[in-house]
Image (cartoon, coloured by chain):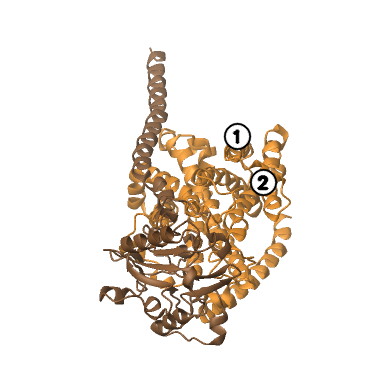
Chain colours: A brown, B orange
Amino acid sequence: MPKAILYDSTLCVGCRLCEGACAQRWGLPYDEEISAQEKLSEHKLTTIVTHEAGFTRRLCMHCEDPTCASVCPVGALQKTSLGPVVYDESRCIGCRYCMLACPFQVPAYEWSRQLPRVKKCDMCYERQQAGLPTVCAEICPTGATICGERDELIAEAQRRLAANPDQYYDHIYGLNEVGGTSVLFLSAVPFEELGMRTRLLREPLPLLTWRVLSLIPDIVAVGTVLLGGVWWITHRREEVAAAERQAGKDGAKP
Amino acid sequence: MTTRLRLPRLTVWQWIFAALMLGGLYATYVRVVYGLGGATNLSDEFPWGLWIGFDILCGVGLAAGGFTLAAIVYIFNLERYKPILRATILTAFLGYLLVIVALLFDLGRPYRIWHPLVMWNPRSVMFEVAWCVMLYTTVLALEFAPAVFERLGWKTPLGWMRTVSIPLVMAGVILSTLHQSSLGSLYLIVPMKLHPLWYSPLLPLFFFVSAIMVGFAMTIFESWHSSRAFGKQLERPLLASMGRVLAVLLAVYLLMRFLDLRHRGVLPLLLEARTETYLFALEIALLLLPMLLLFRRHVRLDPGALYACAVMVIFGFVAHRLNVSITGMETGSGTHYVPKWTEVMVTLAIIALGFAIFRLAAKHLPIFAEEKRAVAPPTLAPLPEGGR
């Protein structure tokens, strides 16, 4: 029963209560100045972004097959069966490959700390385990952000699209993007007008590297036989040459 | 005459070395105390900079001469290349050690560098690179060990090394094939971020072929420097034949790059007046020019011209890796990145350290001793001695 978040941009009034609730849960400072920064950072794990066409939210998309989890050399990032993609800071070596690889540019780093950590939304993992909604969904006064099971939220989004086709842009963002995400978006306008990345592949990105990585056993096997074979051939030539020299000597003696 | 000329030059280099070491120490202090934020211009949008782009991606590539030459000598049995093998293995070994030093600067938590040993994620290219680099550095240490054993006069371990040398070389070649190409695979995961002039499904192949290519260039480069520093005769015919191989490799590599651009239909991008286009042109020019020159016989036989070609290839190779890791990533990340002085300082200090250690090792260990043996093998054979 994987959980998900549905954010309906047409219902959002930009009150930023989700930002405040999120900061409080993480024990991060939150004030006028921080609320005005409309970008994700080590002290802002979700943000409202204002566009002419309306509001949107930025937060970890909790991909179904997360790129960050696939690239992490030590498995510090994991997709849980409950839906959230969680980060285990005790494993992290700080290579920042997750930040480079994330197709939504979500993970942030504590650049100014001596022993930095990656910071990103964890979809209130411990609350989800207790059956509670995320704090951003709980506090949202208009129901723009709701939390529930992914299948049900997809059905709900489809209902809304069907009921008010002229009010919505006909697409559920996150249904198929990079193989699907656990955060789904609805909007009145095309998503690129909300500054969202729309030139995304439909297949999960980890497949791009896996196609190469899965060849390793074959490369090792073929490589060993090939190198061994070449060595055998090149040194056989030597053996033959030595034998011929020997034969030549023997033949010349008598 | 030569000693009088060499001494003052040495002092200047020692001064430069000392200055770089001091600068490097101060940069290290800044890195440790103020963290990555204080020591680099990296950001959430641009998390990998000069240390990954140059110190790691180029460092590993520039050390590729080690596995290439080991394969040529031991697997392909081309004995005439043996005189320069040890110096090349030493360069590769130092290269990998310095890459690990650079990695300690770049990792947010350097003291956890050993984590991939026990915390596995076989889906991660980085995990594979970590293991291969670790294993291959061990292989290089073992391949270089005979030089140390010879110096110490340890006969028994020398015998052991001879027994395992072929499997060791084979393991080295396979490990190198894997991680040299995987450095390119690292970027397969960013199809939307990396500029289409560089993003290609063939990135692993390009990284592998360019590593072999620059391996030859580095071998020529360091033979030239060693011959100057230690007053040795250059192995002219040997280097000339390497120049020939380099020319062919360059031709194959450039043709593959061109066909890749054509098949992906991105050749029209070259008409756009953008920074990416200019830096792409620079990268290609630095490889195309030496290729054309190396196809000429008198260039290959002129040590100075051959050296110049090798230097161009090295710069062209570095340009490609920096284009992939920095130039090509800027537009996609929506930022502009210029390394901070501390990043440059650490990089320069690491390069200087490499040169200094190579010099020291070459002075005190039998790196070039095999040369004499290869030139005059009969003097070493015991039979004529006793028979006389």
Q: Which quarter of the rendering shows the N terminus of chain B?
A: bottom right
- For marks 1 and 2, the one nearer the N-term is 1
Q: Which quarter of the rendering shows the C terminus of chain B?
A: top left
The disc placed on residue B248 is 1
Q: Say which element carries label 1.
A: helix
Subunit bearing disc 1: B
Q: Position of residue B13 (x, y in %)?
A: 67, 65
**Contact check, label 1 and label 2, Cβ < 8 Å:** no
- Left or right relative to B339: residue B127: left
Instruction: Determine the residue positioned at 40% across, 45% down.
Output: A211
Circle 1 Cα neighbour tier, 10 Å, few/some/many (<14 / 14–19 / ≥20): some
- Of A184 and B12, the residue lying toward us: A184
In the image, residue A117 sits, relative to residue A188, either above or below, namely below
Per the image, the residue denoted by label 2 is: B269
In the image, residue B279 sits, relative to residue B294, either above or below, namely below
Q: Where is residue B135 in the image (x, y as percent from the top left)?
A: 38, 54
Which amino acid type is marked by label 2? Leu
Instruction: Determine the residue positioned at 54% across, 64% down.
Output: B48
Q: Where is residue B221 in the image (x, y as percent from the top left)?
A: 62, 49
- Of B211 and B239, the residue lying toward us: B211
Q: Say which element carries label 2.
A: helix
- Left or right relative to A104: residue A131: left
Subunit bearing disc 2: B
The image quarter containing residue B130 is bottom left
Circle 2 Cα neighbour tier, 10 Å, few/some/many (<14 / 14–19 / ≥20): some
Instruction: Determine the residue positioned at 49% across, 48% down.
Output: B66
Q: Position of residue A70 (x, y in %)?
A: 38, 58
The image quarter containing residue B113 is bottom left
- Of A231 and B259, the residue lying toward us: B259
